[in-house]
Amino acid sequence: AKENGRNGFAFYHQAMSLAVEKQQNMESELHQAIEEEQFCVHYQPLVSVGGEIIGFEALLRWQHPEKGLMPPAEFIPSLEVSGLIVPVSNWLLGHCSRQIVKWKETGFWQPDWYVSVNISPLQFYQADMVPTMQQAISEGGAHLTDICLEITETVAIENIEFAVNRLKVIRELGMMIALDDFGTGYSSLSYLKDLPIDIVKIDRSFVQELGQKSKSQSIVEAVTNIARAYELKVVAEGIESHDQLMLAHNIGCDIFQGFFIERPQVAEKLKRTYLTRDLS
Ligand code: C2E
Ligand code: CA
Ligand code: CA
Ligand code: CA
């Protein structure tokens, strides 16, 4: 038994150092990715009830020299752990800002559109987050009112007092705030009252069960009704079918996002395939 225990420990130890080594390799690759600008941004349209584009969510991608295009789930955790998410996010904000300017110059951009950017917990709690972001956006040439910041409720309630104050400052500067993945965390509808936000994004796990599970239907309805009472816009995320779109539409969601409407893609391609859609 003792012998087994030892071996067990040895295996455990080996597995641990492998995990540490993996993270270290990843980190040095990510450092290189920053230096060589291997990151890129895909934009996914957000559309209104009438099917018109009203904005885009900016989604980070890593064009890995050997592994190809990597989705955020595979590298954002390492960016978070290493703190590299902060410079990468600022790069992304600058990049989006320059893209907005290009879209304005070509007449593609409409005045009421916005680009929505995901803000990580680490970034949200940086002391100099606000001026750093302001600088990245201004240097790119866009207006602060062209940008919406997406934070999760988990981030917001980690330190609710701090979050409320920070969000107030951000909104006073003209940026919008969306509460992302709503319904997945320690959700309480009462946060919708306390937080100075503009938009609630209902998590796709609920949207995808519309028409299948009455519980999800009720949740989407409840969130939409409360949000309406607080004059917030509601985004239904992860719409993959016509049925889901119609159901979310009938419940009264304001904004729709998902593969059924448009997949995230590079800016150049987006502009070429741009059409206004009739959702009826
Ligand atoms: P998220 O903020 O919830 O972003 C939406 C995710 O849902 C995106 O995945 C998008 O491609 C995907 N999606 C959109 N429509 C559909 C649909 O109809 N069906 C399904 N199954 N998925 C859909 P993506 O791009 O892989 O991003 C995953 C997560 O990574 C994001 O979730 C966000 O939390 C994080 N992320 C992405 N970009 C950034 C970034 O620049 N900074 C930070 N901090 N996080 C980011
Ligand atoms: Ca998001
Ligand atoms: Ca705007
Ligand atoms: Ca989301």
Image: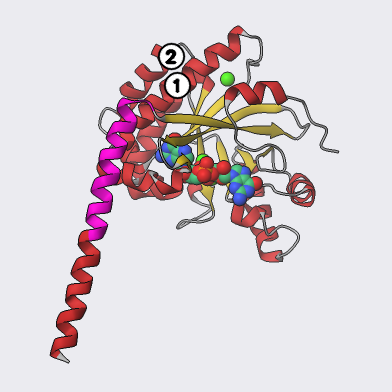
Quadrant containing the N terminus in the rendered view: bottom left
Q: Which mark is residue 95?
A: 1
Rendered view: 49 above or below 240: above
Q: Is residue 194 visible?
A: no
Q: Please report the residue visible at 60 percent of the width from the left and 32 percent of the height from the top.
A: 265
Quadrant containing the C terminus in the rendered view: top right
Q: Please report the residue visible at 18 percent of the width from the left and 80 percent of the height from the top.
A: 7
Residue underneath mark 2: 140
Q: Amino acid at mark 2?
A: Gly
Q: Is mark 2 within 8 Å of ligand 3?
A: no
Q: Does the magenta-highlighted stretch encompass residue 116?
A: no
Q: Is residue 206 visible?
A: yes
Q: Which residues are magenta?
A: 18-37
How many other residues sit within 10 Å of disc 2, few (<14), some (14-19) or many (≥20)? some
Which of the 4 image quarters holds residue 171? top left
Q: Amino acid at mark 1?
A: His
Q: Please report the residue visible at 57 percent of the width from the left and 28 percent of the height from the top.
A: 266
Q: Main secondary structure of the magenta part?
A: helix
Q: Nearer the viewer, residue 211 or 266?
A: 266
Circles 1 and 2: CB atoms closer than 8 Å? yes
Q: Position of residue 243 (x, y in %)?
A: 79, 51
Q: Position of residue 184 (x, y in %)?
A: 51, 56
Left or right of residue 253: residue 30: left
